[in-house]
Image (tube, rainbow, N blue to C red):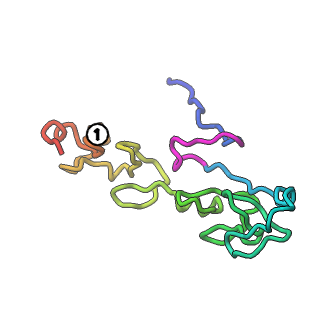
């Protein structure tokens, strides 16, 4: 028996929907750089200077992250791939291609520091490999239950004796 599975996570990240609660676990929202046209509306302004190469932008340029870039200068900070088709911003407000962003923002287990791709346990503000989700005091497995003591997972037994 049982209930049919509910497909709650079927939203494919429609444009305009940003998920900010769990940024690491959501598919990143792809930003689109703005076209050159916005610069040509203001001929009285001095030429925009590319934030990457510090050279004036004469024709091919785009706006992103509140700055001006040559099209060829707007690239991923890690792999230098062109970001004209779209980009994701990391925590340092740097543009990344979606592939590098996925690799750099991988959720990591707080015990082994390795990326988590498969099944995991969310607890105490972290995601854990199931085999690493153990009591910080006695190392007992916490698969059956735990108590969050000041952000650290403890088994029920240790939590009743310990105030960290």
For this rendering, which residue is in front, 47 or 143? Answer: 47
For this rendering, which residue is in front, 106 or 3? Answer: 106
Residue sticking out furthest to the left: 161
Quadrant in the picture for residue 160? top left
Residue at numbered disc 1: 148
Image coordinates for residue 86, horizontal then vertical, percent: 72, 57
Image coordinates for residue 58, horizontal then vertical, percent: 84, 71
Is residue 122 shown above or below 67? Answer: above
Left/right placement of residue 136 relative to residue 72 reads left
Task: Write the residue at 47% across / 54% down.
Answer: 107
Asked whether 26 falls inside the magenta stretch, the response is yes
Task: Write the residue at 61% across / 69% down.
Answer: 77
Left/right placement of residue 31 relative to residue 1 reads right
So how many labels did they put on this image?
Answer: 1
Task: Write the residue at 76% across / 69% down.
Answer: 70
Residue stretch rendered in magenta on the structure: 15-27
């Amino acid at each position: 028996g049982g209930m049919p599975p509910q497909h709650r996570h079927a939203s494919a990240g429609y444009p305009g929907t940003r998920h900010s609660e769990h940024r690491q676990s959501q598919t990143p929202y792809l930003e689109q750089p703005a076209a050159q046209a916005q610069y040509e509306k203001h001929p009285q302004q001095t030429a925009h200077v590319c934030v990457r190469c510090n050279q004036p932008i004469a024709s091919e340029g785009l706006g992103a992250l509140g700055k001006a870039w040559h099209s060829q200068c707007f690239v991923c900070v890690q792999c230098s791939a062109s970001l004209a088709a779209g980009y994701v911003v990391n925590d340092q407000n740097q543009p990344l291609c979606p592939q590098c962003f996925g690799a750099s923002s991988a959720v990591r287990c707080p015990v082994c520091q390795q990326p988590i791709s498969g099944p995991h346990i969310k607890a105490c503000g972290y995601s854990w490999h199931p085999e690493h989700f153990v009591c910080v005091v006695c190392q007992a497995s916490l698969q059956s239950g735990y108590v969050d003591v000041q952000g650290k997972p403890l088994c029920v037994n240790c939590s009743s004796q310990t105030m960290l």
